[in-house]
Image (cartoon, rainbow, N blue to C red):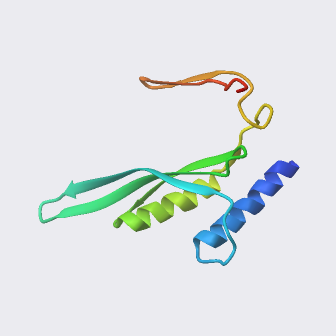
Amino acid sequence: AYKSNEAIQLSALANSATSAATGGAQESAFVFEVLHVRRVQKVTASTKHMNFSALVVVGNGRGAAGFGLGKASTQQAAVDKGTRQALKNVVYVPRYDQRTIFQPLTGKFGATKCSIGFRRRGP
């Protein structure tokens, strides 16, 4: 399969970020943000099983972004799994003038509507 130069650079950045997240000495170019952590319980006849889910978003501020959902029995493990999943799902968003998107976008999923507008040039 053909890979553009941007895709090759992104995979190299993701590999460096993964090595940094797993204890490597290299500094990561991605910014990690935990958007939401949820605690869920499964009630059985004998006990309550508690788990956590974490939604994590990563990005480099230059057009590459990804998100991941991690689930585990501890909060930190869920965040770590979400971070690894987000690094695997990094995509490149083409930008106009290195600052905004080309045109306004609108999307709908279920009852949720999301619209993203472009930013006009400032003074």
Residue 15, picture quadrant: bottom right
> Can the viewer see residue 3 in this picture?
no
Q: Position of residue 27 (x, y in %)?
A: 67, 69
Judge left or right: residue 3 versus residue 85.
Answer: right
Where 76 sits versus 119, above or below? below
Q: Position of residue 74 (x, y in %)?
A: 35, 67
Q: Residue at x 78, y 37 (%)?
A: 98
Q: Position of residue 34 (x, y in %)?
A: 46, 53
Q: Quadrant of the C terminus?
A: top right
- Disc tally is 0
Out of 88 and 46, give the one closest to the viewer: 88
Judge left or right: residue 36 versus residue 115.
Answer: left
Where 3 sits versus 73, above or below? above
> Can the viewer see residue 19 in this picture?
yes
Out of 90 and 25, give the one closest to the viewer: 25
Out of 109 and 93, give the one closest to the viewer: 93
Q: Residue at x 72, y 39 (%)?
A: 93
Judge left or right: residue 115 versus residue 101.
Answer: left
